Amino acid sequence: MKATLSRRTFLRRSAFAAAMPALLPSRIWGAEVAPSRRIHLGFIGNGTQGRYLMGNCLNRPDVAVVAVCDVDSSRRNNARNVVEQHYAKKGGPGSPKVCSAYSDFRDLLLRSDIDAVVIATPDHWHTFVGMLAAKAGKDIYCEKPLTQTIHEARALVETVRKHHRIFQVGSMQRSSREFRRACQLVRNGALGKVHEIHVGVGGPGRWCDLPTEAMEPGLDWNMWLGPAPWREYNSVLAPRGVHTHFPNWRSYREYGGGMVTDWGAHHFDIAQWGLGMDESGPVEIIPAPEPNSESGVQLVYADGTVVKHVTGNGITFFGSEGRIYVNRGKFESTPETLVETKLANHKIQLYESNDHIGDWLHCIETRKRPICDVEVGARTVSVCHLVNLAYWNNRRLRWDPKHEQFLPGFGDNAWLDRLYRGNWNLDRVRNA
């Protein structure tokens, strides 16, 4: 404990006080999981989704939760207490007796005994936490949407690959049977030629205009903002304490991308899977018919398939010989016989997972890529960002999915990035 505290003091004095990402010791960059023991996990972000993911892991015999991190003292202390009480009551031989709690994720990443981390922070933090975790030799489960910009998505993929990490994105619909059934049927021609896909999610993000509110002690607001622009506190963005709802920071462009990225990271992901576009994307983006619309943007792929952003919720594949509507727990088709079609006879077999976190943990042991690998998440979130960019700029865009750039005259490549506050800089972290 004394050694941990001295490292923490060093970080505070040398790097954290200047808001710079700490350089992590080279001795832990190549850390590997020993197959003979439990996978030791750290949880970064202990809000509603973070608690759900932690609860999922606590009951797994092959996992030990040993550390939690949150910028809110109430949430991190609650998370620590939950872990320690769980193991005191239900843990068997080898269960951890102490769970450490951190306010700065960089301190947690210095722990050489932590094999992997689960990231459930607001979206604007995903890239920085994910890149530094990869550099620290940790395998990673990161919530969706993966990144805040298209440039961040590519930088994160490159960092994960460089450090040979196993990275699962939390677009967990890929581990649900109804979505796999829909996509495998589409990929094997059960609908004939698919010409259009409707993706029903909410609207684009907007700039934050919330008023200033007084803040109680116990929240590191500067750290909550991190790379995002400075603004005064508002409880809509970071409600204090152990809340049970999903905060609305996700509606604002500084911290999320509205429902286009939030739900879109689920439903556009399934459209990409069904099209076999996990390593590519559209070539053209057509704006909505009317300015200030919240639906109507269309994505055009190289083979002519159109993916249209519509109101409602769910995904509908339209083909020359039928249609499929799929959503959580729902599968409807024309013809109806597709509900009972045996998938085992298909020529194209999609990756099968019935447990998203379990798939990640298994891949940590095998060192194989999981069902929603970082590249998959990067391509999906890039699609979501392109949809938002069409709404925000109200113009037709042409896209090169191979080089991930706009064609000259059909978009501004400056839109693929964002401004960062202080010393939180994408290139600085990537090249450190």
Image (cartoon, grey):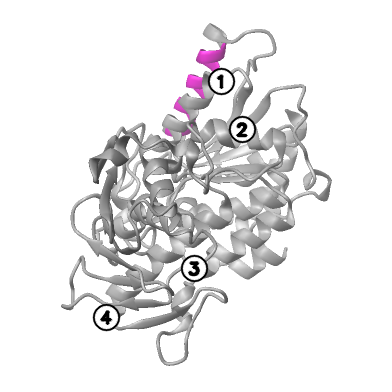
Residue 303, image x, y percentages: 42, 73
> Amino acid under label 1?
Arg
Please, which residue is most extreme toward the left here? Answer: 290
Magenta stretch, main secondary structure, is helix
Q: Residue at x 63, y 32 (%)?
A: 362
Q: Taking the image as drawn, is residue 45 in sight? A: no
Q: Earlier in the sequence, mark 4 or mark 2?
A: 2
Instruction: Please tell me whether residue 121 belongs to the stretch shown in magenta.
Output: no
In the rendered structure, find residue 150 and report the number of the disc placed on it.
3
Q: Are marks 2 and 1 in contact (CB under 8 Å)?
A: yes
The quadrant of the picture occupied by the C terminus is: bottom right
Q: Marks 3 and 1, how far apart in space?
A: 35 Å
Magenta range: 75-87
Q: Marks 3 and 4, how far apart in space?
A: 18 Å
Q: Is residue 173 above or below residue 14?
A: above
Q: Are marks 4 and 2 in contact (CB under 8 Å)?
A: no
Query: Which residue position holds label 4?
Result: 394
Crowd band around label 4 with a 10 angstrom C-alpha radius: few (<14), some (14–19), many (20+): some
Q: Marks 4 and 2, how far apart in space?
A: 42 Å
> Amino acid under label 4?
Asn
- SS for tag 4? loop
Query: Which residue position holds label 1?
Result: 60
Crowd band around label 2 with a 10 angstrom C-alpha radius: few (<14), some (14–19), many (20+): many
> Amino acid under label 2?
Leu
- SS for tag 2? helix
- SS for tag 3? helix
